[in-house]
Image (cartoon, coloured by chain):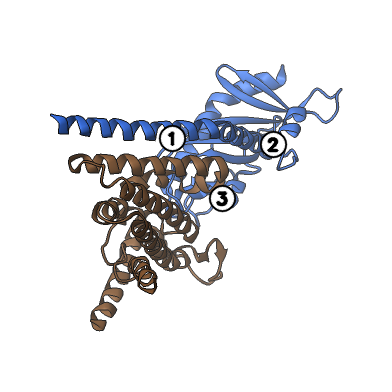
Chain colours: A blue, B brown
Amino acid sequence: MKNKLTILYIMVAVSTASALLLTAVNELSRDVIMRNQERKLKSAVLDVLDISYDGKNPESSFNTNVIIKKIGDETIYLSKGQTVEDKSIDGIALILKGPGFWGPISMIIGINPGDFSIKGIEILEEQETPGLGARIEEAEFRDQFKGKYFNKKIVIQIKGKAPGPNDVSAITGASLTSKSFENIINKASRKLVEQITELTDG
Amino acid sequence: MADQSEKGFAILTKGILKQNPTFKMVLGICTTLAVTNRVNNSIAMGVGTTFVLIFSCLCISSLRNYIPKRVRMAVHTIIIATFVVFVDIFLKAFFPIISKQIGPYVALIITNCIIMGRTESYASVNKPFDSMLDGLGMGLGYSLSLIAIASIREPLGFSTYMGFNVLGDWWTPWTLMVMPPGAFLVLGLYIWVLRSIYKEKK
């Protein structure tokens, strides 16, 4: 009986020590991690909207150039026109989310409001295979989307096939990640194009 | 004193060649197969695992006389997991870029058999300082093995080394090398070569 109690005490002591230590570490680093994430989001928004910013302080450029708006439960980011009188919007950034091959992929996409041509794509989160699917993060893949049209169906083709006007090349060895990527964009396109048109017209 | 440092040196170096955890004992193979398609990821994984190994061995060895035999595995796991979560939070807060690249694998360090193996077979019966050296040696052996495998896989599969293009355009990337079968092939070759050499010496 005494033996069993000792085991219990030791397990409780070790677990408590572990929990206390990790709570402290978590508490101390929470603000830094939150700031990192927010900064990453803001830099990504500025990147896809082609707005220049200071890498160490994206917040100031974000606050002066970007308006945050909600359509339903979607958050969209609008870049303001160049002058105060100019009330036009010269860029829209949307967060797109969907399932990847291994886990959720979320990305931010910048669009020109007039013709829906894509200004840029940045990946916020992905859990694809490092070196294969995770290459969706590489500029070589993402830059292919620049100038393609968000309001038309985008097709991700196997490398080497004759590309149509709205086609981009898939990542070799990561066909399923590429397919998921294509689905996320096209699904969002079907859902959001109309709403964006209403917003920019009105 | 000379004896002491000689003994320490022997403990440290046995993990690198004689008892190399990856090639000799074939432990921790899951992560070895997963991260070795890039040299950079291998280095980050090696450093993380080595850190966890050193501190888990130190901690478990210091507590070895107080941990009841019947629950030692549970206690070891809690201690190892504590350090792994610590590494994960630390990377997220201060090295967000590395954390993003190897994030999913950091949590897998908990299940790395090298750590369970060393804490069970060495740290739980040896003095703290020796255990720490043993952890460091095994960690280095593991890291070097990962780098050795990645040094073959990355150039052949991506024609790059640590992200820099080394093989030029004439090389057609051998995609198989960056997929799981490539890892099995290269690992098998290393085990074969190293074991043949070691056998001759005996």
SS under mark 2: helix
The disc numbered 2 marks a residue on which chain? A
Point 38% across, 35% down: residue: A18
The amino acid type of the residue labelled 3 equals Glu
Picture coordinates of residue B179, whole percent (x, y): 37, 57
Depth order, front residue of A11/A26:
A11
State which quadrant residue A42 falls in: top right
Please name the residue that numbered disc 1 is placed on.
A21
State which quadrant residue A38 falls in: top right
The amino acid type of the residue labelled 2 equals Leu
Picture coordinates of residue B113, whole percent (x, y): 28, 52
For residue A85, side relative to residue B13 (left or right): right
* Residue A176 seen in the figure: no
Depth order, front residue of B69/A172:
B69
Depth order, front residue of B70/A55:
B70
Foreground tag (3 vs 1): 1
Picture coordinates of residue B72, whole percent (x, y): 23, 43
Please name the residue that numbered disc 3 is placed on.
A138
Instruction: Tell which residue pokes out farthest to the front in this image.
Output: B1
User: Decide: marks 1, 2 in contact (CB < 8 A)?
Assistant: no
Would you place residue B167 above or below residue A93 in this image? below
Classify the position of the C terminus of chain B by image quarter.
bottom left
Circle 1 crowding by C-alpha within 10 Å: few under 14, some 14–19, many from 20:
some
Circle 2 crowding by C-alpha within 10 Å: few under 14, some 14–19, many from 20:
many
Please name the residue that numbered disc 2 is placed on.
A46
The disc numbered 1 marks a residue on which chain? A
Point 65% across, 23% down: residue: A197
SS under mark 1: helix
